[in-house]
Image (spheres, grey):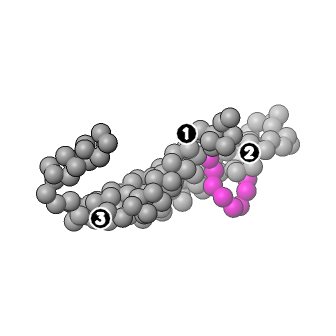
Amino acid sequence: MFLLGFALIGRACVSTAPVEEARAFAETADAVTDAGTLLVNSLAVAERQRRRELHIANSAQRYQFDSDDAPYFATIGEPPETGSIRRTLRVVTAYADLVVALVEGNVAASKSYLVQISNDLKQITGIPRSSTMR
């Protein structure tokens, strides 16, 4: 009951939702993500190359297999740091889309964006999924 009253008071304070501003924010977030894609792609190449150079330079590791190094030698997927940066950009874009969904009153889309943001943040921070936290 308290939350409902609080929501009604908050709704009364705002005469109209800033839909156009939210859409402009979402468009800007999309533009930043699009522009950052080329940079992040280049970062993935550089991250792999640097790790390979370090691996080859270390004579003790040169012929040793370590599964933690697999993302640096694989031709699919991304190296860990690059993946974190790309997921961070996805969080910003999803947040902008969440703001638009909220001001437009789209509850289903809001829930979807919240789940996406939550999953990406879990991967970025290394927090285990709730099913494994028992």
Left or right relative to 84: residue 2: left
Within 10 Å of disc 2 (Cα), the crowding (few <14, some 14-19, many 20+) is some
Seen at 43% across and 63% down, the residue is 108
Q: Is residue 60 left or right of residue 89?
A: right
Of residue 23 and residue 34, the one placed in the foreground of this image is 23
The percent position of residue 72, horizontal first and vertical second, equals 69, 50
Residue drawn at x 16%, y 60% as measured from the top left: 16
Residue holding disc 1: 125
Residue 1 falls left or right of residue 12: right
Q: Earlier in the sequence, mark 2 or mark 3?
A: 2
Q: Is residue 55 visible?
A: yes
Residue pointed to by mark 3: 104
Q: Amino acid at mark 1?
A: Thr
List the single residue furthest toward the front: 1
In the rendered image, which residue does mark 2 sit on?
Answer: 69
Q: Which stretch appears magenta?
A: 73-82
Q: Secondary structure at mark 1?
A: helix
Residue at 60 percent of width and 56 percent of height: 45
Q: Nearer the viewer, residue 4 or 77?
A: 4
Q: Earlier in the sequence, mark 1 or mark 2?
A: 2
